[in-house]
Image (spheres, rainbow, N blue to C red):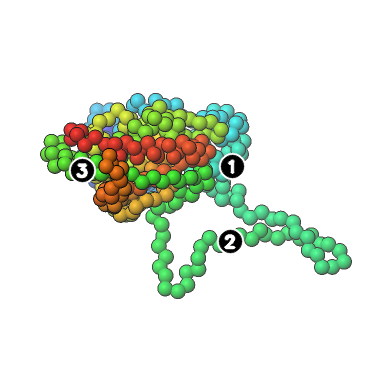
Amino acid sequence: MAEVELIMPKMGESIMEATILKWLKKEGDTISLDEPVLEIATDKVDSEIPSPYAGIISKILYQVNDVVPVGKAIAVLQTEVSTASKFTPDISTPKSEETKPEIKADTAVNNSTPSEAGRFYSPLVLNIAHSENIEMTELAKISGSGEGGRVTKRDILNHVQHRSRPEKIAAVEIGSETSQTKTIEQQTIPTTAPSSGNTEIIEMDRMRKLIAEHMVMSKRTSAHVTSFVEADVTSLVLWRNRVKDIFEKREGEKITFTPLFIEAVVKAIKDFPLVNSSVNGTQIIRKKDINIGMAAALPSGNLIVPVIRNADTKNLVGLTKEVNDFARRSRAGQLKPHEIEGGTFTLTNVGTFGNLMGTPIINQPQVAILATGAIKKKPAVLETEQGDVIAIRHMMFLSLSYDHRIVDGALGGAFLRRVADYLEDFDLKREG
């Protein structure tokens, strides 16, 4: 029998390492082709690693909670293949996306030149550096624990924690004939409440910790502004009620409101392309691809945001199938890492929780996120040729949070109004 190595796979252009969560097999176990061997976690998503061959696991090289760089062998398999080789399971991005160049340090935070020529940093590390006002000269001095000395998220967060420790300052004590200088510690306000009384302490799970870090980083990074509009979506509701049974019978998929919302968002982005951008220092990067992230709730209560790539090239049937597929696999924990990367704009449907509206936090490095509220029947004033009348209509609030560094109130408000217009002007005669 020959020996082959199971390699920690590449799981996206910005992911350089992963944590082993659980081994599904132990040494000596027999395994089939494509059978899951272990579960891993990255900053983006949890995944199962399938076996590249049928055989026997002869040696496990890393244990649970070990952080392993991409490309490292994590186990050795005994197999019937004629020659030994290294094989990486294909759970990464499509080849057309893997060819994208990695971001160099000298294109990121400020315009400083790194002290180590050719050193690379992941977008996550660069975002943290930017939000913490870390110059490139300072970033270059951080010792990296990743592959080839690469700075990881853990490295830069440790640096930030050390960097932000209370510094000793000089104070002058007055009250005697001479002034005496002494050193005191700066006082900090406790961030945790006392646990006295009838309370329960719940430790955040790994994903909740990542979400917390990402949300706080987003608020530090972007100047958040939120605008609201109320839309009359009666035509949209009546059309869906009319075609949903026919649509499901023909396509084998239920049509929800989410793909219809995405369709309107895509049209509005084409009208106002600056909303589909990101910020890098003083540079505005306008994205030509329209990749819509859709926030999906997990059984744990956490949220994940799979991305519908090139949403502007898909018709309503295609959007519906992809939305439903992502929703199903999100709940089952079956998303691949590359499926939650590369978003240029995010939609979150807070109406599914019965909420009328929300003030969502921008999904960095994007510059805008749209929240759609619950659709409610309400009395509304309609203008007719015979005069104004009051009628029962299907109404919905839309809210847009945007980065005021590049999206002004006029642009944000106009974009939001345009999304509402597309929903209000929905063609009742459209075929399902």
- Which amino acid type is shown beneath numbered disc 3? Leu
Residue extending farthest bottom: 197
Circle 3 residue: 238
- The picture quadrant where one finds residue 309 is top left
Tell me whether circle 2 and circle 3 mark residues in contact (CB < 8 Å). no
In the image: residue 167, left or right of residue 48: right
Quarter that holds the N terminus: top left
Q: Please provide percent x and percent y for residue 41.
A: 37, 45
User: Mark 3 or mark 1: which is in front?
Assistant: 3
Circle 1 residue: 133
Quarter that holds the C terminus: top left
In the image: residue 253, left or right of residue 230: left
- Which amino acid type is shown beneath numbered disc 2? Ile
Which label was assigned to residue 189? 2
Q: Please provide percent x and percent y for residue 384.
A: 28, 41
Q: What is the spatial separation of the Cα atoms under label 2 and label 3, in whole angstroms?
A: 54 Å
In the displayed structure, 390 sits above or below 242; it is: below
Camera-nearest residue between 77 and 100 = 100
